[in-house]
Amino acid sequence: MAWRRPVYIVAGFAGIVGMALLLLQPMLAASMLPGLGGSRGRRLHRLVGAGLLLAVIIHVAGLWITSPPDVIDALLFTSPTPFSVWGVIAMWALFVTTCVAVFRRKLPGWRGIHRNLAIAIMTGSIVHAMLIEGTMGPTSKAMLCAAVFLATFIGIFWSRRARRSWLRR
C-alpha cells in the first residue's frame, strides 16, 4: 500500500466499508439488532443500503481514476484476474437490487427477488474480497467475510421463521 496513490487507497477502503455495511444489512432486514426492529430497522436498512451503493460507486470510481483499462476489462469480463469477475457480478446485483427496492410496490414477489439478489451480492463480494491481496490482512478479511456469510444466512432464516410464526397467529 505504501506505493499506491491516495485515490487507490480510498477506493480500497471504500470496498472495506462496503463489506462492513453488507454485514449490517441482513441483521437490519431481519430485525436481529436490539432496538432496531420493525420500521426503524427497515428505515435503517434502506439507509445502509444507500451507503453500500455509495461505497461501491466510490470503490469503482477510485479504481477507474487509477486504471481505466483495468476497470473496462473487468466490466467487459475480459480481465485476466478472477476477482474482477466476482466484483462486477456483485456490483450489478447491487444495482439491480437497488432498482427492485425502489420499485418494490410495483413488483409482486419483490422480497424473494431482493433476497436472491442479496445472496448474489454476498457471494460475489466474499469471493471478490477473498481473491484480492491488498488492503486487508488475510485474517481480518476472512473473519469479516465469514461474518457477512453467517449474518446473511442467519438473517434469511430468522426473517423467514419470524414471518411464518407471525402468519400462524
Image (cartoon, helix red, strand yellow):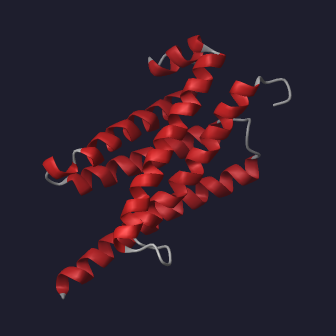
Where is residue 88? Give x, y as percent: 47, 30
Answer left or right for 118 relative to 11. left
Residue at 42% from the left image edge and 67% from the top image edge: 155
- In the image as oriented, which residue stretches furthest toward the right? 2
For the point 86% across and 29% down, the residue is 2
Q: Position of residue 32 (x, y in %)?
A: 46, 73
| Quarter of the rendering containing residue 92 | top left
Q: Position of residue 128 (x, y in %)?
A: 57, 38
| Residue 158 seen from this side | yes
Total number of numbered discs in the rendering: 0
State the image coordinates of residue 27 (x, y, percent, origin top left): 46, 66
Q: Residue furthest bottom?
A: 169
Q: Is residue 26 left or right of residue 116?
A: right
Name the one closer to the observer, 48 or 139: 48
The residue drawn where x is 57% and y is 11% is: 69
Quarter of the image for the C terminus: give it: bottom left
Residue 63, above or below 91: above
The answer to whether residue 153 of the structure is visible from this angle is no
Question: Which of the image's four quarters has the N terminus?
Answer: top right
Q: Is residue 10 left or right of residue 108?
A: right
**Viewed as shown, does residue 121 lie left or right of 127?**
left
Residue at 45% in and 38% down: 90
